[in-house]
Image (tube, rainbow, N blue to C red):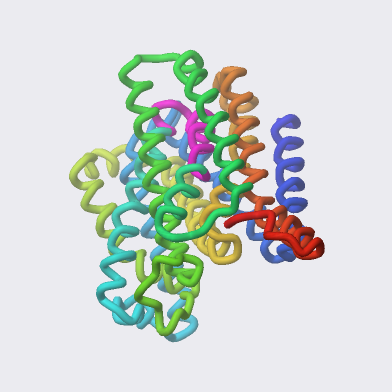
Amino acid sequence: MLFASLVAILTLGWICIILRTRGAATQACACALIISLTSTQLLMKVLMTAPFNFRFPAVVSTLHLASATLGTLLFWAIYGDLRKFLPQSLGSSTRYLKYVAPIACSMPLSIIFNNQAIAHVGAGMNAVIGTLTPVTTALLSNLLGRQLHIQAWAGVFVASVGAIIITIGETAGLVGSHSIIAAGLAFAIFAVLFRSAKVVLQDMLLAPADYTGESEPLKPLEALHPMHVWALQAPPSLAFAALYTLATEDVADAWLSLTPAIALLILCTCIASTALNVLGMYIIRDLGAGSMQIIGKLNTIITVAVSVSMLKEMIPTSVLGGTSVVLLGVAIFENSPKMCQKLNLQATEKQNEPACIA
């Protein structure tokens, strides 16, 4: 426990150092994001293993979305503007179908697949596989029009090397049926892909001017408030998750499996998940999709430390080494705008061509 606490303190301190130029509010949100993300993953692991064995990840994921929807409803009810839930508030039905509808599908699937992966391969290994998210997010955001600096692509390359190291060590470090391991890895990878799609689409709503391919600006080029985006995506996401749950899990069996202890644990996961979802939206607004995923992946260190020291998971040394390489890559990615500005300033002073190409 002492080891895990020390790792958590050092990691949160590292986040504050990375974001020292972003302001105290962003630093606090980022640290709270890491804590809520780690708490959600570990609580889900505890919920779905002995002695609770509540293996209904889709049911729990639907409850997570329901709690986030309720929180959003209360937020806009307090501000007296429930019209934010209406598609018309986006200003364009085409834009609603283009962005909100895909988010409504990708968000619940990313949550459900993430919880399924935790049930199959554990919280630590799932967090390790999740280090791929910044890479896939960077590639997708660039494909959709957000420009990345050369140094950012260097960070993506380094992170990809780390991902290869992780892949080599994954199978060797997992104990259990090959079919269960394969299913867990597949769930984790699909969770990464859907999470990247969701975050990039949210980023396009929160900062449309950053995407050069945008031809239909929001009222005009007006970025949405993070809770407005939540109001738009919450109802369809909840409906999609509920349909998926009814189609894949026995809700009646889940109800019969409930005990007071399990219900309390589910409530804790809902609180942590709601905080995670809301804080994540604010971090996307402040840092962008790529940087948000980079900051979020620092939870890997804490999750792995707690999983090894408290949940007795076994993580191969090669996987830990690969995670370190990935974290180096994402650190390069986060610092790329600063590096680019510095190089361009030096080039301007020397009256040369810009040294950094976006």
Q: In this view, does 62 lie above or below 167?
A: below
Is residue 303 covered in magenta? no
Question: Picture quarter containing residue 74?
Answer: bottom left
Q: Can residue 67 be seen in this view?
A: no
Q: Report whether 222 appears left or right of 30.
A: left
Classify the position of the N terminus by image quarter. top right
Hey, which residue is sitting farthest bottom in the picture? 80
Q: Where is residue 301 in the image (x, y as percent from the top left)?
A: 64, 35
What residue is shown at x 38% (from left), y 21% (from top)? 181
Residue drawn at (47%, 63%), measured in percent from left and top? 203
Extreme residue toward the left, this view = 247
Residue 34 or residue 96, whichever sits in front? 96
The rendered magenta stretch, by its main secondary structure, is classed as helix
**Residue at the spot 73% in from the left edge and 60% down from the top edge:** 352
Residues in magenta? 118-134
Identify the residue at horizontal 63%, vertical 24% (top origin).
Answer: 321
Q: In which quarter of the image is the C terminus?
A: bottom right
Rendering coords of residue 192 (x, y %): 42, 41
Position of residue 227 measured from the top left corner of the image (x, y, whole percent):
47, 71
Is residue 121 covered in magenta?
A: yes
Name the one closer to the observer, 351 or 79: 351
Where does residue 54 sit, x and y in percent of width and height?
A: 37, 35
Whether residue 251 can be seen here? yes
Q: How many numbered discs?
A: 0
